[in-house]
Structure formats: structure tokens, C-alpha cells
Amino acid sequence: MKASLIITTCNRPDALIQVLRSVEVQSILPNEVIIADDGSTDSTKKIIESFTKSSKLNVIHSWQEDKGFRVSRSRNKAIAKSTCEYIILIDGDVILHNKFLEDHIKHSEPGFFIQGSRVLISEEATMRLLRNNTNKFSFFSKGLSNRKNSIHSNLLSIIFTKKLTSIKGIKTCNFSFYKKDCLEINGFNNKIEGWGREDSEFVVRILNNGIIRKDILFNSIQFHLWHPKSSRALLGKNEKILEEAIQKKLDWCEDGLNKFIK
């Protein structure tokens, strides 16, 4: 199955290069890597150009003007550029286990979307990684939170994988779905700007359209680098959009992915 890996980023080239290096050593490579760039300066562009010169990955840089935090719009633009039937979303500050993509594809199933697990890395460990230019992690690495999530086990994954119809704990930094399912709900809601609730609102609509959530544990592992918290200034507005989707049982947003499909 052809899969697109979409990486969201904004002005964090030092982390992005580490993410891309972890993609290069995957047991199964993505057919394309699309960088969903939410208004980064030229430093990110230069990192991507330098990386692609020596990499075997097919990297596409999808950029939009900096008008604040607009990750929904950035992801929609990237999804519109995708040529593959399956989409895997990650953030630009996560280091992938070398079987991350293989696990997502292995667990893919018509009628479901997937959320994987993550391990949080402390500020000190993140600074050490960026300083030493190394990104290998294991269960025994220093500076890890929720350390059990770093255990890779196919047997445990079978036992603990859950199928749900709730939005609790949704995080699209480790997330995958069939592109057709995304098209049917018009992707992410462009009206959600600023940090928060774009992922939950997306999931409300995809659940309302009959696609079930599958949480994968002990597979599809990523290590999330530390970063300062984003501004919550627009969170109240975004929560109202989420609440409307819940109350009206919406499965479509008017301002979404179709804006970028030619």
C-alpha cells in the first residue's frame, strides 16, 4: 500500500532534520514525505533542500505564509498534495522508532483510523540530542517519561490494542487514516487557528462518518522532543467549533480540504 508521511513543522529546523533522519532508517520507507510547513523562515527551507540532495526519500515541501498558528490549513494543503491512498501524520519534533511506518501500515484496516503512542523526552535530554546530533532512544535511555511506551512488542500490541469511539486523549502527532476517509469529511477545519482542538474536531467528524478509532500500544512508537507550550489564546474559540461539531453530529466542515484540491 502506498503511504504518504506528512510532517508538520514551524521554525524548528534543528528538530526537523532529526525527524527526517529517523525516517530514512525506517524498515519500510514512505512513498513520499510531505513537509507541512506553517510559515517557517528560509532556515527550514535550506535544511530541507540540503537534506534532499543526499537522501533517497521523496521529499515535498508544502509551505504557507506565516499568519499565526494555522496547522489545520497547513495539513490540508499537504494532504491535497499527497498521491497515496494512506496518510500518516506526525509532528516535526518526534523521533520515530525504526518500525514506526511499518507498524502503521500493518495495523491499517478499512473502516478505522489509527492513533499510536508516544514517549515524552525531557528538556535536558532534548537539548543533549540536538547538541550531540544523535537520535537513538530505547527503554533504558535517560530523560524519558511514560517509559513503558518505548517497549516494542508485537504480542503486547495485539493484546492491548483498543477500538474506541471517543475523542479523549486524541493527538494527531501520531495518527494515520485512509485518504478517502479524510476526503469524505473535508479534512481538517481551516477555521480552527491557534493551538488546540483541531485534532479533536477532525476526529468527531470522522467518527460521525462511521470510521472507528484504533489505539495502538507497543507498536507505532515515537519519541517526542521537549518544547515550550504554545499560546492558548484562541483555545476558547476553537472549543466552540469543537462543541458545535459534537452537538450537531457533523461529518463535514465547509472550510476544509477541498479548498486546496484542484
Image (cartoon, helix red, strand yellow):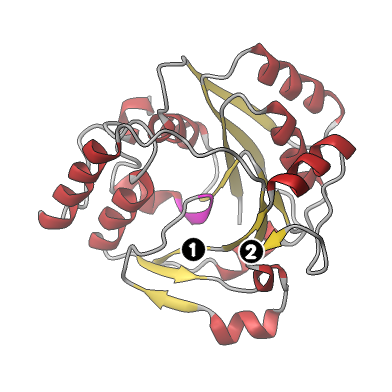
Q: Amino acid at mark 1?
A: Ile
Q: Give the percent coordinates (x, y) of residue 245.
A: 18, 50
Q: Position of residue 52 (x, y in %)?
A: 78, 27
Residue positioned 35% across, 42% down in the render? 187
Q: Quick one: which residue is furthest to the front in this view?
A: 124
For marks 2 and 1, give the CA distance.
10 Å
Quadrant in which residue 164 is drawn? bottom left
For the residue pair 207 and 167, the one nearer the viewer reads as 167
Q: Which residue is mark 2?
A: 220
Identity of the amino acid at label 2?
Ser
Q: Residues in magenta?
A: 173-178
SS at mark 1? strand
The residue carrying mark 1 is 114
Q: Is residue 92 above or below residue 159?
A: above
Q: Residue at x 77, y 40 (%)?
A: 127
Predominant secondary structure in magenta?
A: strand
Task: Examine the rendered structure and indicate whether residue 14 appears above or below residue 182.
Answer: above
User: Residue 235 vs residue 121: left or right?
Assistant: left
Which quadrant, please, contains the N terminus? bottom right
67 displayed left or right of 19: left
Of the pair 19 and 144, the residue shown nearer to us: 144
Work out whether residue 58 or residue 8 is closer to the camera in this orientation and state it. Answer: 8
Q: Is residue 130 left or right of residue 169?
A: right
Circle 1 residues within 10 Å: few <14, some 14–19, many ≥20: many
